[in-house]
Image: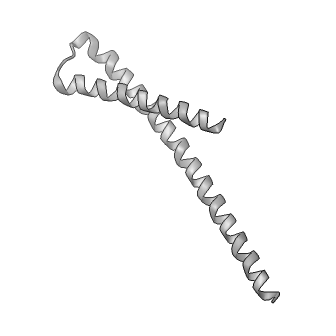
Amino acid sequence: MADKVMMRQKGSFTKSFEQLEHIVTKFEEGHIDLDEALPEFERGLGLVEELKERLKEVENKVEVLKKQFKDNEMEEDEAREEGEEGK
């Protein structure tokens, strides 16, 4: 189930990023009129905030996983050392 959530988030992240790229391209190429510019700029800022939040969530998850891995590795090392001492 976690894989489905991650895939949905990935798809949403990718879609949001593509939308942001599209907005940026319109501004860079000058394919936007003044009436459309401000709402698109606001939409772009919203997408940036959304993407930053998702990246922060992923970063936090990676930190948790790294800590769990390190803790598991330390437990395995301790168990190995105890096994060697018992010989």
Question: Extreme front residue here?
Answer: 87
Left/right placement of residue 82 relative to residue 9 reads right
- Quarter the N terminus occupies: top right
Q: Residue at x 56, y 37 (%)?
A: 6
Instruction: Tell me: residue 52, above or below residue 87.
Output: above
Residue 8 at x, y percent in the picture: 54, 30
* In this rendering, position of residue 31 left or right of residue 84: left
Residue 40, percent from left and from top: 32, 19
Between 46 and 51, the residue placed more toward the observer is 51
Q: How many marks on residues? A: 0
Most distant residue in the left direction:
30
Which residue is rendered at x = 19% and y = 28% of the image?
28
Relative image position of residue 32 (x, y in whole percent):
22, 16
What scheme was used to colour the molecule?
one colour
Tell me residue 38's x, y (percent). 30, 17
Looking at this view, name the residue that lies furthest to the top: 35
Instruction: Identify the residue at horizontal 31%, vertical 29% (top origin).
Output: 21
Give the quarter of the image for residue 67: bottom right
21 horizontally vs 62: left or right:
left
Which quarter of the figure is the C terminus placed in?
bottom right
What residue is at 26 percent from the left and 10 percent from the top? Answer: 35
